[in-house]
Amino acid sequence: MDATWSAPGITGVFIRLRWNQVQTGPGQYDWSILDREVQRAVDAGKQYSIGVKAGKKGTPDWIFTSGGVERLRFQDWGSSATLDCKKKPCCGYHLDLGSPSDDEYRKQYFGMLDALGSHLQEDASWFRALAMVKPSGMNFLTHENRLPKRCEPGCLCNTEVWAKADNPYTPEALTSFYEAQFNVIEKAFPGKTISYMLIQAGFPLVRDENNYLGGGTHNLPKGTSQTEDIIAMGHAQHTALFAVQHNGLGPGPRNANPADSPCAKGKKPLDSDEHCPSPWVLRNGKRGMVTGFQTVNGARCGDSPTLDRTLLNLEENSNGVFIEVYEQRTWEATAQGGALDSKGSKRSLEAWNTMLHHRAGTSNTYEFTFDGSDKEVSFVSAARCSDEPSVGTIKVR
């Protein structure tokens, strides 16, 4: 909306694209929607992040009919059985995908990313305004990295489809897919942050063609291990250019003293409407990684006071430096002016934005305790070595 582009409390937007929307055939691209929104960002002095999803309503059919990709058909309902459960059993949404081990699928998806990077670099102002690129391609309904994984009685066994494909799914193939994609993004979008949107246990439990959830169960991967392996690999290889985010932050527990919060004690809130930030994001934030969030959906974060409590949750219970908010909430906050909640933080959206900018600007200061007599240690960030390397200082207490 126009109000989004003009709001001083908004740094930028997430431009969410569908693969079948931007690539209509082999080597055929339609950048019209992208160009329109990127130019609006530049004109308004905003930044933007970008992601291109496959999955439901995103996978182009031509990759199967003329692109050499093996078509894998799935039916799954994702996280909530209430989404399309008018009939029982609730088997969920239909969608087609390629396998992470399918070389042709990789060729087509990575080729699109490479073309996207080249297109944005044609205009220096467009590329300069780009903040983050969101890996996707192994996704389900949205851009978040997850896949159909259920094997329910009376429904299609999605894990068997993965395991029995001509290009079978394995955890190793999944990690390799993301390793290759991160490298493509770093080359096609030099200097831009790779922001991995995690779903903790989002990937199918498949070991090989004979062992999968619903079939043989020898040595199946643990629920979150595949996500953890991808994040560890991304951080090890791309260091400061690699960020982790979770798209499900909600209002935190109501505690006058953050130290008394169950989040600070590693416990779950008793109130089901209250959230602690994702422990996977917190864990990686403590390792020095850039971290951030997207709020829970617009219904669960349904008004300005709830948004205020969500932002307080980020501030008090994480070291995240960015958050993506649904546009309706930002419109309401901008229209009403003043504090999001006069009884809460008493901050406006602009004040919250300023806080996050300050936090991001100070997040590269590290403190560590040494036993020796040195009081200050300087270092060069290995992730930023260039003609003008980034020099930091560790202050010793």
Image: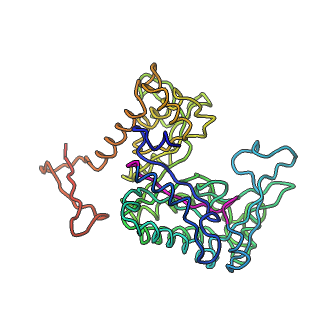
Give the extent of the magenta segment: 44-59
- Above/below status of 64 relative to 261: below
x, y percent for residue 177: 56, 70
Q: Is residue 96 left or right of residue 266?
A: right
Q: Is residue 243 left or right of residue 225?
A: left
Looking at the picture, tell me which residue is in the foreground, 263 or 12: 12
When asked about the image quadrant of residue 108, the answer is: bottom right
When asked about the image quadrant of residue 189, the answer is: bottom left
- Above/below status of 143 relative to 354: below
Most extreme residue toward the left, as rendered?
373
x, y percent for residue 267: 53, 35
x, y percent for residue 241: 38, 60
Looking at the image, which residue is at 53% across and 31% down? 332
Instruction: Identify the image quadrant of the C terminus.
Output: top left
When asked about the image quadrant of residue 387, the answer is: bottom left
Looking at the picture, tell me which residue is in the foreground, 55 or 151: 55
Q: How is the image coloured?
A: rainbow
Looking at the image, which residue is at 20% across and 52% down? 393
Residue 185 in view (yes/no): yes
Most extreme residue toward the top, as rendered?
343
Q: Is residue 49 magenta?
A: yes
Q: How many marks?
A: 0
Residue 138 in view (yes/no): no
Looking at the image, which residue is at 67% across and 54% down? 141
Q: Is residue 345 left or right of residue 206?
A: left
Q: Is residue 83 magenta?
A: no
x, y percent for residue 87: 87, 46
